[in-house]
Image (cartoon, rainbow, N blue to C red):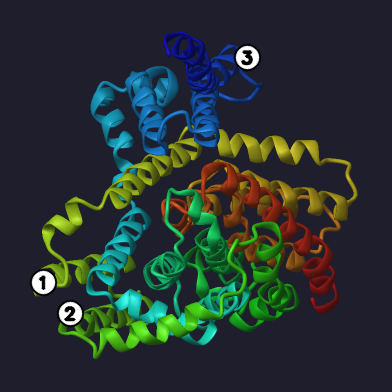
Amino acid sequence: MKPTTTLNDPNKAAPASAGQKKRLIMLFLPVLVAVLLLLTPVPAGLQPYAWHFFAVFVGVIVGLIFEPLPGAVIGLTGVVVIALFGQWLLFSPAELADPKFKMPTEAFKWAVSGFGNSTVWLIFGAFMFAAGYDKTQFGRRLALILVKYLGRRSLTLGYAITFADLLLAPFTPSNTARSGGTIYPIIANLPPLYGSKPNDPSARKIGSYLMWVAITAACITSSMFLSALAPNLLALALVKSIIGFNISWGMWFLAFLPLGVILILTMPLLAYWFYPPEVKINDEVPKWAKAELEKLGKLSRNEILLLIFVCSALLMWIFAAAWIEPALAALLVVVLMLWTGVLNWNDITSNKPAWNTFAWFATLVALADGLARVGFIAWLGKEGGQLLNGFDPQVAAVMLLIAFFLLHYLFASTTAHTTALLPAMLTIAAAIPGINMPVYCLMMVTSLGVMGIITPYGTGPSPIYYGSGYLPTKDYWRLGTIFGAIFLGGMMLIAYPWMVLMF
């Protein structure tokens, strides 16, 4: 037996050794990319500290793509490094020269600024809603109802999720509240009914497909309706302020309508082709779901309370956004769930996915906001305008639109993207004679929703679905690229000609 053991041991050690080498390479790669950019000469017109910040930012993005460590660790590392070396990475010479300026204090304030972001707290609230659905079994009840009537085919479940989002979208100005706080807590209960578990090979049975359908639906409906995404309203104000062009709710809806209808009708099927579930048809599961519903019996006290609380949150998100911040509405519901016993404090503190996503997204928000703070985004807009001088107006418009879409890779918030880039893009276009500005403006603003699909941090609900355990990092980035290309192609080939014809 000894010879056999001796011979087998090296073979057993080899994969582990190869895995360790791969992990070391992935750990080293983000650092290498950041260092190479730091050693690259600073582009003309850009302050050195802004370029150095961008170098670290790119290193963080590379780390998030390859994920040698959890995403929260990568993001936190980037924030801490920049804050520690703020005199070279974050603050301008003028700020440092001010005797009243306290660099350590200001660096810390910037480092933790993302934790005060309302979207970050809304995402956290969505995870707590999901915990309530799970603990009370109300989510399981709703999932069983969906399975009972639509569960024979995975594809029909995909369409059910899509149309549920579509019905809520016109009345919910936060896609995080709509998709993360309402849709996700329900559908999170569906995969286990089919034996599909998170962070497990069985995730591909059906869970991965359903989660991807849900996030793509949220992105499409966010572009379909002016009132379906908070930054849409900000974009509207910026267009009116900078260009003087008024966009009504109806104009927005009509501009995106043909592409929106096509995407809504085909997206679950496209996801079915590109990311097929292993379970496609199951005649027994709907019958089993019917039996399980009978076992659950009538709604319990906590289920009724949860239903009241969630409906209250939905009403506040739809009708009371002018009086109460959506994130505060979510926290109010969390407090009510704690006081009434729907959840207990241990449910909050033990929710690892919620805290992990909270930390990860908060650091990314700070990093993305820092790009605008150091002047990198403004410089990028200025350089883009100079590069487009002499181009045909239509070609210039298309190039700007594509750049606006792809630059979303640099942002962990659609609001930040809109605030930082839209004014620059509008100003550049307005300076180029011959551009159809109404069409250009409509293309810019209606792209804000669909561009959120490209990364796991591209829009509010993204981290929720990414953190669900059903969408591995490599799958998310791959699918984000595929569907991002489909959405961008649809904007260029369907929406643009339609808008030219109508406006």
Q: Residues within 10 Å of mark 2 (few under 14, many from 20)?
A: many
Q: Is residue 333 left or right of residue 396?
A: left
Residue at image mark 3: 40
The reply to whether residue 322 is in sight is no
User: Vertical placement of 493 versus 202: above or below?
Assistant: below
Q: Amino acid at mark 3?
A: Thr
Q: Residues within 10 Å of mark 3 (few under 14, many from 20)?
A: few
Residue at image mark 1: 341
In depth, the one of 456 and 343 nearer the eye is: 343
> The residue tagged with tag 3: helix, strand or loop?
loop
* Residue at left offset 81%, top offset 41%: 388
Mark toward the start of the polypeptide (1 vs 2):
2
Answer whether labels 1 and 2 touch (C-beta < 8 Å).
yes
Q: Quadrant of residue 70?
A: top left
Q: Nearer the viewer, mark 3 or mark 1?
A: 1
Q: Tell me, for residue 302, which label it has, or none.
A: 2
> The residue tagged with tag 2: helix, strand or loop?
helix
